[in-house]
Image (cartoon, rainbow, N blue to C red):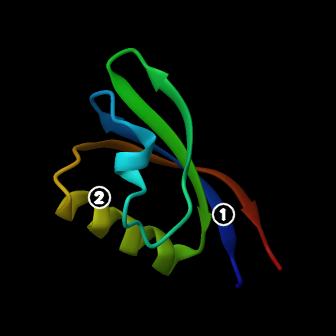
Amino acid sequence: MKDMQTYAILLRDRIDPQEIGAASPLRMEVDCLEGQNTKFEVHTDQSGIIGLLRYLHGRGFVILSVNCKSEIRE
């Protein structure tokens, strides 16, 4: 894949990591539970992050922020 990046995503509420990734199209790693929110990272390209955001929204998760942490060009 080209233009892979690491994204940090913050969701409202404390969510079980297994619930987030139950049927996710991508592998996600829960970074930490920040207070009452859940932060995780995913490494993907632009189409992957769009699909993931649609997946999370469709499952009813409230997305508080999405930040690009790094850029790796292959």
**Residue name at image x 46 percent, y 24 percent:** 33
Quarter of the image for residue 6 reads: bottom right
- Marks 2 and 1, how far apart at CA: 18 Å
Q: Which amino acid does the dot numbered 2 rest on?
A: Leu
Task: Report the residue at 68% width, 71% height from top.
Answer: 4
Tag 2 near tag 1, CB within 8 Å: no
Label 1 secondary element: strand
Quadrant of the rendering where the N terminus is positioned:
bottom right
Q: Residue at x 66, y 63 (%)?
A: 5
Is 60 on the left or on the right of 67, as rendered?
Answer: left
Kindly give the residue lying farthest to the bottom in the view shown.
Answer: 1
Q: Residue at the location (42% across, 47% down)?
A: 18
Crowding around mark 2 (Cα neighbors within 10 Å: few <14, some 14 to 19, many 20+) is: some
For the residues carrying marks 2 and 1, which lies nearer the camera in this image?
2
Most extreme residue toward the right is 74
Instruction: Classify 65 as above or below 52.
Output: above
**Nearer to us in this view, 21 or 46:** 21
The answer to whether 49 is drawn above or below residue 3 in the figure is above
Q: Nearer the viewer, residue 36 or 6?
A: 36
Q: Tell me the SS state at disc 2.
A: helix
Question: Which residue is farthest top?
Answer: 35
66 in relation to 71, above or below: above
Which residue is label 1 attached to?
5
- Three-letter code, disc 1: Gln
Q: Which residue bears the numbered disc 2?
A: 56
Q: Quadrant of residue 50?
A: bottom left
